[in-house]
Image (cartoon, helix red, strand yellow):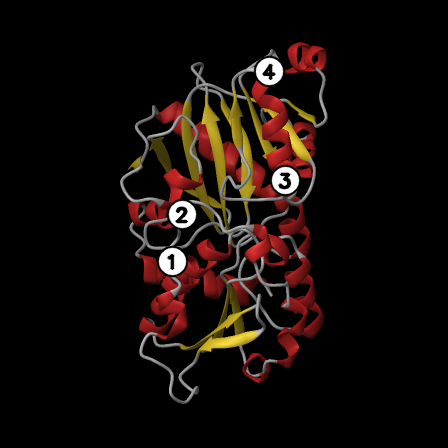
Amino acid sequence: MRIAVLVGGASAERDVSFATGSAIFRALRANGHDVVAIDTGEGRVIDSREEEGREEGGQLELAAEVGTAPPEVGALPGDRAGALGSVPLLNETELVFVALHGGAGEDGRLQALLDLVGIPYTGSGHLGSALAMDKLVSKELMVRAGIATPPWLVAPVDGRALEDELGGFPVVVKPSREGSTVGVTLVRAPDELGAAIERAAGFAGDVLVEKFIPGRELAVGVLGSQALPIVEILPSHELYDYECKYTRGRTEYRVPAELSVEVTGRVQSAAEDVHETLRLSAYSRIDFRLDEAGLPWCLEANSLPGMTETSLLPKAAEAAGITFNELCERIAKLALELE
């Protein structure tokens, strides 16, 4: 099959996208597909068998390492996802494998464009992508559906509201439309709050001030509509931040998580409920904090979770007996079934 892998983009998760795209690219080629890679941030083909003089491995391989901090917003390329129609190879594509994170690649705009031009693509549709990307909207929908999510306020906030509605400090400050914990700060004292809000305000969307839930960090991949084995995350920092996610040795993972049968079922059921409530399809990853009483609190849903061979969704799939190459193949086939 002729597959175009979309990578890069123009969000703060550009480096993460290259790592995801590189792993997917190699897996699809190993599976026998004719694969090209296109950077939507620069609107150009960066790896194709048809390019003359391409270095072995291509630029996609060279950009596969993620730093310990997201790139500065001012250093990012402009978003040129709308120029994809001018890339000749895309017109010959049977399937687009979306390996983007954040920005236009994950918030539904790219998905809507592909819907309009009639090219099938992996992951959720434009509505589910938009709902999951906006944490404020997704949390409001979760509350309506009876799914536990940490209580929150939208900045600016005053001290009395924070005390009355969130129970005081600590709180987590985050931009509502970013992933990979970009712009996220754990705030323990009032004098730290202003700087944390200012930092988060530099990214897209509203700034959420969310109650911090003490407990265990869990992630649940959903493939099709079924939850995969639960991953427990044990970061070296108190918060599972960008550095812990993308720096080797900073985080320990337990797959499957050591939980009782009852709690395992509760968490997996909650993940499936979030996946359905937010109109997600094909695959997703749902992140939770598990409190001392065994109640899972949903932090967010990821419509395009990381897909390197050491990312959380592939770890969960491996625990279910699904290799990384098989996982990529299943996701590609789900895209064609859902079209």
**Which mark's residue is nearer the viewer, 1 or 2?**
2
**Badges 1 and 4: C-beta atoms under 8 Å apart?**
no
* Residue 235 to residue 8: above or below: above
Q: In this figure, which residue is indicated by the disc labeled 3?
A: 277
Instruction: Answer whether residue 71 is visible to the viewer in this image.
Output: yes
Please name the residue shown 34% across and 80% down the image: 55
Q: In this figure, which residue is indicated by the disc labeled 4?
A: 190
**Badges 2 and 4: C-beta atoms under 8 Å apart?**
no
**Which mark's residue is nearer the viewer, 1 or 4?**
4
Q: Earlier in the sequence, mark 2 or mark 4?
A: 4
Q: In this figure, which residue is indicated by the disc labeled 1?
A: 327
Mark-to-mark CA distance, 2 and 4:
36 Å
Q: Earlier in the sequence, mark 2 or mark 3?
A: 3
Mark-to-mark CA distance, 3 and 4:
35 Å
Q: Amino acid at mark 4?
A: Pro
Mark-to-mark CA distance, 1 and 4:
45 Å
